[in-house]
Image (tube, rainbow, N blue to C red):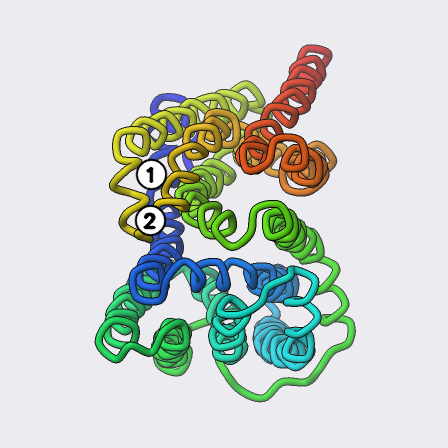
């Protein structure tokens, strides 16, 4: 990185670093949205609700995978930097094997919990049947997905992020094609959607294995010696990512728990369809955050704290602009959007009445998220953790368990905007303190 270039073209540098990350994040969101489209049109609202009820399972897998992988990547990277190639390769191999073992064990445990989970959520009839059909297959797909993600981190560590982006693109295209074949042509229902995800993940894994067998220069497959120390350090290093994903999973479970009791299947379906927009927008925000973070860290480490703050401010303007664009587009296309996923007047009515309320959260959620990235990048872990915990867990849970009981489905839509507004107050408090610290310095 060039400090002078960052000063002269700050906005350009943010875009340069953010666009590849945004593309990767959007590709990730497209799989989820495409699955929702085919389920809504070829299975029905019960299928959408069933898949959404199991999202905490996916977040649990992601949390475990990130916990092992991020810690392992850090250890391998430090060993590589120290010139210890053997320790580097050993850490890589152990990380992959540990990720796979943890994922398989987790699947065995979750398979025994389907009944209790459906009972707690009061899911019956078609919703329960679709849930079992889909997640019995996904328990095979999720370990592959987690291992692919872990491999992807090491591919980036090889300096080949474009290769993994191509694999992500292949995964998206193949997944959508197979969704069409299994759900539309063969009428296999949610089981077909799950099978499409599994096959696409396996093809991606084959492409990844080819890379590590033929093209990798640093991280190579082979035998490894298990190290308890590496395992413990990996889990500790990645524990914050696990907590973050678990917070999201718990919040999603709470949403489903409350909606199923207060509104029912139609409410879960409507919330899921609106949630696709939120998910896509959050991927854009994460892309900006991932792009700006290394710039902020570099500027802050070079004692250019004013530049670091300027990068944050500019990135916040970009995400605010993105939130405004999404809000206006969805306001104009709301009728069309709801009909894309489901042809049900009750669900469509809930989407129309709730979309605008829910999307007001976009004006603040991007700022809160980017500021959390900023504090992480500048070594202020406490501030970052408080912002993330507030918007993803503490304040959100309080809103989920109070507002729907006071205002019904309107309360469900209000939970996100109220959470982001409260968190925004916390964010502003931390930023004022950060400015005060710089002034004193």
For marks 1 and 2 on the same chain, the one whose residue lies earlier in the sequence? 1
- On the image, the x and y values in percent for residue 81 come to 58, 60
Q: Where 136 falls versus 162 (above or below)?
A: below
Q: Nearer the viewer, residue 365 or 357?
A: 357
- On the image, the x and y values in percent for residue 309 come to 54, 22
Q: Residue at x 48, y 58 (%)?
A: 49
Numbered mark located on residue 125 in the image: none
277 relative to 86 in the view: left or right: left
The answer for how far apart the CA atoms under marks 1 and 2 are is: 12 Å
- Within the image, what quadrant is residue 324 found in? top left
Numbered mark located on residue 23 in the image: 2
- On the image, the x and y values in percent for residue 12 come to 32, 30
Q: Nearer the viewer, residue 355 or 140?
A: 355
Q: Residue furthest left?
A: 185
**What residue is pinned by disc 1?**
16
Q: Residue at x 42, y 22 (%)?
A: 317
Q: Residue at x 42, y 25 (%)?
A: 320
Can see residue 26? Answer: yes
- Within the image, what quadrant is residue 395 found in? top right
Q: Looking at the rendering, in which quadrant would you find the N terminus? A: top left
Q: Where 411 falls versus 314 (above or below)?
A: below
6 relative to 144 in the view: left or right: left
- Within the image, what quadrant is residue 199 found in? bottom left
């Amino acid at each position: 990185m060039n400090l002078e270039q960052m000063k002269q073209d700050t906005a350009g540098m943010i875009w340069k670093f953010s666009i590849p990350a945004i593309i990767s994040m959007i590709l990730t969101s497209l799989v989820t949205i495409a699955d929702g489209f085919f389920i809504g049109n070829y299975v029905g609202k019960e299928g959408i609700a069933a898949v959404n009820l199991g999202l905490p399972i996916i977040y649990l897998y992601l949390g475990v995978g990130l916990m092992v992988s991020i810690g392992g990547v850090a250890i391998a990277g430090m060993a590589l930097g120290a010139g210890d190639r053997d320790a580097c390769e050993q850490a890589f191999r152990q990380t992959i094997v540990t990720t796979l073992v943890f994922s398989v064990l987790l699947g065995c445990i979750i398979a025994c919990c389907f009944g209790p989970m459906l009972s707690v959520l009061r899911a019956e009839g078609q919703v329960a049947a679709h849930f079992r059909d889909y997640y019995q297959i996904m328990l095979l797909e999720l370990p592959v997905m987690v291992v692919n993600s872990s491999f992807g981190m090491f591919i980036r560590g090889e300096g080949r992020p474009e290769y993994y982006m191509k694999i992500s693109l292949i995964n998206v295209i193949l997944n959508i094609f197979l969704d069409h074949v299994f759900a539309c042509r063969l009428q296999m229902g949610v089981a077909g959607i799950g099978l499409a995800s599994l096959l696409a993940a396996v093809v991606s894994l084959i492409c990844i294995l080819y890379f590590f067998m033929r093209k990798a220069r640093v991280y190579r497959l082979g035998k490894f010696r298990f190290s308890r120390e590496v395992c413990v350090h990996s889990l500790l290093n990645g524990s914050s990512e696990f907590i973050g994903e678990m917070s999201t999973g718990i919040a999603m479970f709470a949403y489903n728990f409350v909606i199923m009791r207060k509104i029912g299947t139609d409410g879960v379906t409507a919330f899921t369809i609106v949630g696709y927009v939120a998910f896509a927008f959050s991927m854009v925000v994460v892309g900006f955050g991932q792009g700006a973070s290394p710039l902020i860290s570099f500027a802050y480490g070079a004692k250019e704290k004013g530049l670091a703050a300027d990068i944050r401010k500019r990135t916040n303007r970009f995400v605010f602009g993105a939130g405004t664009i999404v809000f206006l587009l969805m306001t104009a296309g709301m009728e069309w959007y709801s009909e894309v996923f489901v042809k049900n007047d009750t669900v469509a009515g809930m989407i129309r009445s709730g979309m605008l309320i829910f999307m007001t959260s976009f004006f603040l959620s991007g700022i809160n998220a980017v500021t959390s990235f900023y504090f992480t990048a500048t070594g202020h872990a406490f501030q970052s953790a408080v912002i993330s915990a507030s918007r993803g867990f503490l304040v959100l849970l309080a809103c989920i368990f109070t507002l729907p009981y006071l205002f019904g489905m309107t309360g469900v839509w209000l939970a996100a905007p109220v959470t982001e507004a409260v968190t925004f107050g916390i964010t502003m408090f931390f930023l004022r303190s950060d400015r005060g610290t710089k002034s004193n310095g």
